[in-house]
Image (cartoon, rainbow, N blue to C red):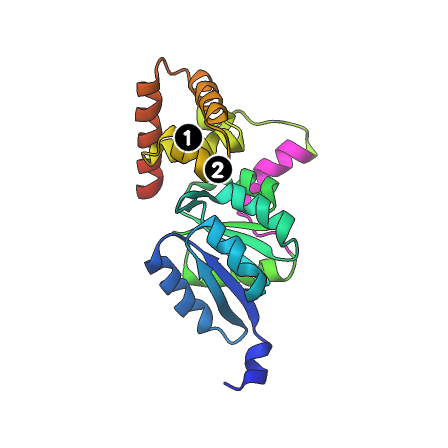
Amino acid sequence: MTPTADLRKRRVFLVDDHPLVREWLTNLINQQPDLTVCGEAESAPQALGAMGAAKPEVAIVDLSLKDSSGIELIKDLKQCHPDVAVLVLSMHDESHYAERALRAGARGYIMKRETTRKVIGAIRQVLEGKLCISEAVAAALAARFVEGKTPPPHSPIELLSDRELAVFELLGQGRGTREIAETLRLSMKTVQAYSARIKDKLHLASATELLREAIRWHERGRTG
């Protein structure tokens, strides 16, 4: 491969907290004649710090990151690197997360259980400036935005705001209030206020119940 030929390849940046996933994606993408991996990161701060020099055209972002929130990273990328298209590749169910990711600024959402052919197709689709979402997500968005209907939530979790969900996920990872505040760049008082709101929205009676539910949600996401 000559340097000139390599320059014609579209540049992809990987953000995932699992080294094995990054290695698999790197091998898959670098086998393509039109794509190349130009950098990788396991957390939002790493990604934001490295993307300026890497100059990617598309970032593949997982939603569960090391010490970070994928949704908040998407929002930050929209601000700091607006020309970088974001494709979410996640094990989290699209019914809970796809619309949040699109609202945050992502151009596509694909599940990790999809075939390699679909993953590569999704990257190319996003690079062409198109949205890449499943038929089910497209139908839900049509009902919400075109017909003016809001479908009932599949789960009480959908009632949480993006920030509340980020706090809930970090609680499920076993993070304390101070750690969550540092990770999300919030005050401890704000994190406590979010925790209280989450507890109310999920109809949980105590902090112990909140923690138990958060751990259950986190484990379901990691295995489902």
Main SS, magenta residues: helix
Placement of 184 over or under 106, stated as above or below: above
Q: Which mark is residue 184?
A: 2
Coordinates of residue 104 in the picture (x, y in percent): 59, 42
Q: Nearer the viewer, mark 2 or mark 1?
A: 2
What segment carries the magenta color?
130-145
Identify which residue, 117 or 198, lies in the foreground: 198
Say which residue appears at 39% left-offset and 29% top-offset: 177
- Can I make out residue 155 in this image? no
Say which label, 2 or 1, has the lower sequence index.
1
Look at the numbered disc 1 and give the secondary structure of its residue: helix
Q: Locate residue 66, reporting x and y percent.
A: 39, 47
Disc 1: which residue: 168
Q: Does the magenta-highlighted stretch encompass residue 133?
A: yes
| Front position in the image: 189 or 217 | 189
> Can residue 212 be seen by looking at this rendering?
yes
